[in-house]
Image: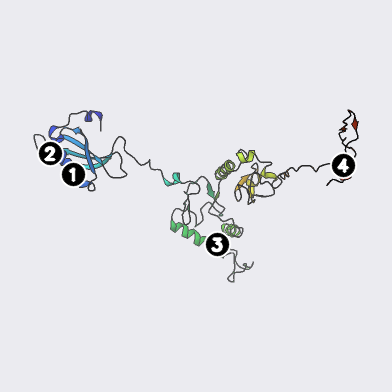
Amino acid sequence: MSAAMRSRTPDRLCAEAVELARAAAEEAALPGMVGEHVEVAAEGDRVVTHFFACQEPGYRGWRWAVTVARASRAKAVTLDEAVLLPGPDALLAPEWVPWSERLRPGDMGPGDLLPTEADDLRLEPGFSGEDAPPPSSVLADEATAGRRLADLADAEDAELTGPSGEAASAAEPAATTERGRITAVAEELGMRRARVLSRYGLHAAADRWDELYGPKTPMAQAAPASCASCGFLVPLAGSLRQAFGVCANEFGPADGHVVSLGFGCGGHSEAAVMPKPLRPAAPVIDETLVDPLPLRPDRGGGSVEPDAPAEELGHS
């Protein structure tokens, strides 16, 4: 709605049709949810919109907008529409974000499914013997095509074995294909996966783990040594072995988590033993020195030998 439209003077008859507009708003809203008349605005020639405050909980700042109009040279005002619209200070819901962008680590619960896109950069086709995806892959264009691939793979694998399940003898016709042999070996080695981690996905995971449990964290900065020399570290397999492992110290802050070899904590297996509390030294008695006893003053002005101990005088 342009500013020029709003700057027009509302039609007098349409502007006076407040009760008609209120009745339409009350018919569209719940009972008692239409508040006071807020304003009237001209939408065009003999077209006016009346705004009423909305009293419904959760719709703060919203207004019922009822548009009325009349024909040229006609005095009867008719109703066009009644809708609920947000006002200038209305409480609005945040902009909608797709679930794939809202999802955060830890959001998934038991029974939740997280589908991955066919062009997910974190994944790449696995070792299946040819460029076509395996039947269980989400990269298959159609379910029927996937079933055909599954039947073909089963037939090729069956050609490698005899009727009794044993390996086919050399006398039997060698009708196996190259893909069948590769598929059978991949299945036996556990390598027949639809997709595997791509180089991008590997680097993204490494950056994420290094940020959580890496050498730049405050815990690692205050640690006595790094995880590379800790006995509780279980190294990962593959290329990640050079930089990451899993902490197996149940008392450590990263127990069960992937940690960088540069990470560290106070639970290091070779951490220094805490010093024992200091104890006061035992008293030392020096029997080679004798403290001099004070002389007893003589009444005649001289001095005499010191008083004998009380034990010698028989005093109790």
From the viewer's side, name the closer residue of 51 and 185: 51
Q: Residue furthest bottom?
A: 164
Give me the C-alpha separation between circle 2 and circle 1: 13 Å
Name which residue lies at 65% across and 39% down.
222
**Which sits in the foreground, 59 or 124?**
59
Residue identified by numbered label 4: 309
Residue 24's disc number: 1
Q: State which quadrant residue 47 falls in.
A: top left
Disc 2 marks a residue whose amino acid type is: Val
Residue type at numbered disc 4: Pro
**Residue picked out by circle 3:** 156
Camera-side mark, 1 or 4: 4
Q: In the rendered structure, which amino acid carries the disc numbered 1?
A: Ala
Give the quarter of the image for residue 51: top left
> Disc 3 marks which amino acid?
Glu
Q: Residues within 10 Å of mark 3 (few under 14, many from 20)?
A: many
